[in-house]
Every structure is written in C-alpha cells, then in structure tokens.
Image: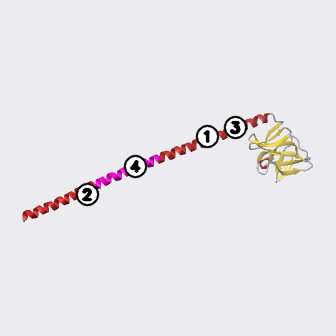
Amino acid sequence: MESKGRRWLGIIISIILIIVVGYNRYRRYEQKQERSRVQQQQIENAKAVQEATKKLDEDAKNKLSEQLKDAAKKAGNIAKSVEQLKNAEMNTEINDGYSIVKLEGKFLIVKDSNLDQAVELAGVTDAFVIPTNDEDHRQKYNVLVVKKDDEWRVVDETKKGEDVLVLTGETITETTKFRVKDKTLYIE
C-alpha cells in the first residue's frame, strides 16, 4: 500500500510540477506578448510624433516663407516710396519717424517713409516744422504747423493731422520758434 500511496503522491507531485512549470511558461509567454505590444505601441507613437513634427516643420517653413514674402513686398514698397520722396518738393522730419511731405502740390503726413499709408492734409496751402522748447516739461521737440483757410494751425501728426490749436491772426515763417511755459504757447 505504501508503494501505491507513494505512486499516487508521485503522480500528484508530478501533476503539480507540470502545472507550475506550465503556468510559469504561460506567464513568460504573456509577458513577452505584452512587451511586444508595448514596443509596437512605442513604434506607432514615434511615427505619429515624426509625422506631427514634419507637419509642424512644414507649417513653420510655409509661415516663414509668407513672412519673407511680406517683408520683401514691404521693403519694395518702402524703396518705391523713398524713390518718390526724392522727387518731393518738401520732405521735413517732424518727430518719431513722421515727416511732412509736399508731393505734386499735396501735403502729406508720412510715417517711416511709407507713402502707401500717408495721410493727406486737405486744404493746406503751406506747412512748417517749428522747433519747440517746452519749459514746463524740459523737452525740445518739433511741432507741425499748417496754413489752412488762411489761418495757421498746430496739428497732431500722430492723429492724422487733427487740429490741436488755431493761431488766429499770427504770422508763421520758417524761422519761427515756439516756447511753452506755464501751459501757454509763445511765438518767438
């Protein structure tokens, strides 16, 4: 009986060992499959990243190309404007890139030598850039003065030539200078 018991015990132990070995092999197989799926997913992710990067690079190149075209067009327009400004009857710097230009009998306020965005001053018959000494703020700057409707007017070049002050009964020449003191404009 002992030999039958040992035999059954041997069979049971063998079955248990076969099950344990089989289970371990099955687990290794599952782990190998999982690693394979992860690698495949990583490859797919890498391809997606490469495609996205390539698309971004192409978009950036296209955007840069458009910016270069726009810059070249602007440079061409400015060069054309500069050429036209050489033929102007008057081209006097005011402040901060603004100029007063007389071209073909018209007075224009021009920013950064760009005639395409110039503002025409309608009804103006004469214009001067007058140096001004602002004693209140301790500054020196230029003021644009135009003659319109037989009156001299101080205009703001940054606001499309809007009138700031009308100088009724005054005579302005190229040699006139302004002085501001206590918020009062004095003509010298």
Magenta residues span: 26-47
Q: Amino acid at mark 4?
A: Gln
Asked if residue 64 lies left or right of residue 53, the reply is: right
Residue designated by label 2 = 23
Q: Nearer the viewer, mark 2 or mark 1?
A: 2
Q: Tally the numbered discs.
A: 4
Residue type at the position of mark 1: Ser
Quadrant of the rendered image containing residue 69: top right
Residue density around tag 2, few if under 14, some if 14–19, many if 20 or more, within 10 Å: few
Image spot of residue 86 (x, y percent): 79, 34
Amino acid under disc 2 = Tyr
Which is more N-terminal, label 3 or label 4?
4
Asked whether residue 38 is drawn in magenta, I would say yes
Q: Badge 1 is on which residue?
A: 65
Nearest-to-viewer mark from 4 and 3: 4
Quadrant housing residue 104: top right
Under circle 4, the secondary element is helix
Which residue: 55% across, 42% down? 58
Q: CA distance from mark 1 to mark 4?
A: 37 Å
**What is the CA distance from the residue labelled 2 to the residue labelled 4?**
25 Å
Q: Residues under labels 2 and 1: Cα distance?
A: 62 Å
Residue 75's disc is 3
Residue in front for this viewpoint, 128 or 106: 106
